[in-house]
Amino acid sequence: MEFLHVPRVAYFSMEIALHNEIPTYSGGLGVLAGDTVHSAADLELPLVAVSLVSRRGYFRQEIDAQGRQIEHPDEWEPGRFASRLTAAVAVQIEGRDVWVFGWLYVLQGHMNGRVPVILLDTDLAENHPDDRQLTHHLYGGDAAYRLKQEIVLGVGGVRMLQALGFRVRQYHMNEGHSALLALELLRRYAYPPEDLRAGESPYNVPWVRDMCSFTTHTPVEAGHDQFPYDLVQNVLRNFIDLPTLKTLAGDDRLNMTRLALNLSQYVNGVAKRHAEVSRKLFPGYSVHAITNGVHPYTWTFPGFVKLYDAYLPGWCHEPEVLSRADRIPDEALWNAHQEAKRALIEKVKALTQVNLNLHVLTLGFARRMTAYKRPDLLFSDLARLKSIARERPLQLVLAGKAHPRDDGGKRLIETLHAHMRELAADITIAYLPNYDLQIAQAMTAGVDVWLNTPLRPLEASGTSGMKAALNGVPQLSVLDGWWIEGCIEGVTGWAIGDTKEAPNGADGRELYQKLEQAVLPLYYGNRAGWIGMMKGAICKNACYFNSHRMMRRYATEAYLR
Ligand SMILES: *Cc1c(COP(=O)(O)O)cnc(C)c1O
């Protein structure tokens, strides 16, 4: 294999967004993993990514006339995109051997860098029928299924890299799902019994810590993967002794985040505020902050790529250059934006039959549909929203999937559809089904304002607003996650509320106020001022909130320590 000549950073992620037709991702975490690999390719960082093949994908979303989400399997054929590797390794689950093989997907960057991605697969005739399905469903099944998947990812992944001949200089766990990899390393580097004094741990914890970095993504305790020890013992058997496991992963339950925290030399949150929240959640650990970023070329609309190539050469390798975007003539920038907006309008028409107007201010909101993201905040006072839209027109494009077992999230999609019907006479609203990479690209480039209204402090980072910034689209957002760092009021976008916790009502009122008094008047009354905001988003935010900066920081602060 061509990738074995240098030691690599092994980047482990349960989900990864590699291509629009490879449904091995569910949302922001997977898109971030994909952007990480794209930046590694462009920067020629030696990295190998490891994930699961997720043959049946996450799910394909259909929405019926009542606004109910219908979930379809999203099967893909790995052989169309990846080559089958001949190596196979075994992991032990419930006392049986489960064979794991892999697919090699080569991510070819647009600047010709290449990064190998190994997609692990258990669908082999040698395996028990239940075990063949372990790599079918992303985030599917029960706790036992999830734990088994995490064994395939963490333990199987380490063994697979070794079987393939990779030399690994650092393991990076993207979220706690892959933390069992650190246990596999502990086992591998246990001291021989004859070297041990009585009562001494056989495991070389300092060595394993030196080999591991961990990025946490979840600002609430309940969001972290936790498994009861009776389940763990039944599934993992004697993989590692229970007292050692409890010391590393928590007394009551196996907490994957604690395990990763205890076995990593470098730990970070994904925005400055999120690192602060994580330090409170896990006192005693040193949690750094590396704010997320998005991959510049992937998330820039072709019309903007042309502009940047002309006025800001080198931006693809060094996005800091985008801080000079004020060089771009206003008219050229506006035309590129209107072209992106036209492309979105066509897509919306094709997918939903809804007709949007090129000259009406368009708000975009798309992300996982779940309670804390509050997609209904904009609709908290329909009379007020109508009266704002009567004064100066606006239209909306929405999208997002709810996890199949998130009933609250599914109800939110239905509620949004009910609001759409109620507002039909006053505001044109489209809900695009099956939110994916392509829809995210079209929306973040083609709307005029990107909206985000999470409940503080639950948005660890958020990344879609960064995609908007690359396309000169300002954001209107609650101050949480990356927006605390990215918001310069009236320059890069607008804030809703302050950074303290606020009740729903206050955020809703502030959202209406900003729309009515700042966003709409500027859009309709001051074209030059509006284009100034677009440039502010590019100059101040696109130049910084990108995955090249993020990966250069991981390289110098985590990987090369
Ligand atoms: C960027 C992206 C996300 C993450 O959006 P957030 O703003 O972080 O919620 C989710 N899904 C898709 C398809 C994306 O492209």
Image (spheres, rainbow, N blue to C red):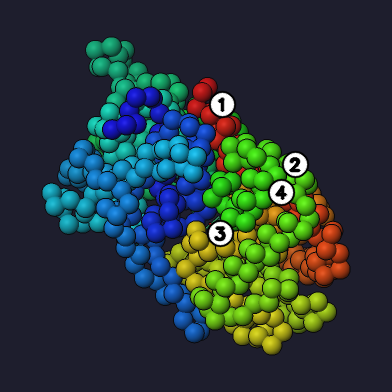
Q: Marks 2 and 4: CB-CB under 8 Å?
A: no
Q: Earlier in the sequence, mark 4 or mark 1?
A: 4
- Which of labels 2 and 1 is toward the front? 2
Instruction: Give above or below for 379 relative to 402.
Output: below
**Amino acid tagged 1:** Thr
Q: Earlier in the sequence, mark 2 or mark 1?
A: 2
Question: What's the CA distance linking mark 2 and mark 3?
Answer: 23 Å
Residue at 34 percent across and 48 percent down: it is 52
Viewed as shown, does residue 338 lie left or right of 118?
Answer: right
Question: What's the CA distance linking mark 2 and mark 4?
Answer: 9 Å
Q: Nearer the viewer, residue 297 or 31?
A: 297
Q: Nearer the viewer, residue 322 or 518?
A: 322
Q: SS at mark 3?
A: helix
Residue at 63 percent across and 45 percent down: it is 309
**Amino acid tagged 2:** Arg
Work out whether residue 230 can be spotted.
Answer: no
Q: SS at mark 1?
A: helix
Instruction: Name the spot of residue 221 as percent of width and height, x first.
Output: 53, 49
Residue at 46 percent across and 42 percent down: it is 109
Q: Nearer the viewer, residue 541 or 106?
A: 106
Instruction: Name the spot of residue 198 as percent of width and height, x first.
Output: 31, 15
Residue at image mark 4: 538
Q: Residues within 10 Å of mark 1 (few under 14, many from 20)?
A: few
Determine which of the numbered discs, if any, sits on residue 324 in the image: 2
Work out whether residue 20 can be spotted.
Answer: yes
**Amino acid tagged 3:** Gln
Determine which of the numbered discs, if any, sits on residue 556 in the image: 1
Instruction: Name the spot of residue 153 as percent of width and height, x first.
Output: 33, 43
- Which of labels 4 and 1 is toward the front? 4
Question: What's the CA distance linking mark 2 and mark 1?
Answer: 26 Å
**Amino acid tagged 4:** Ile
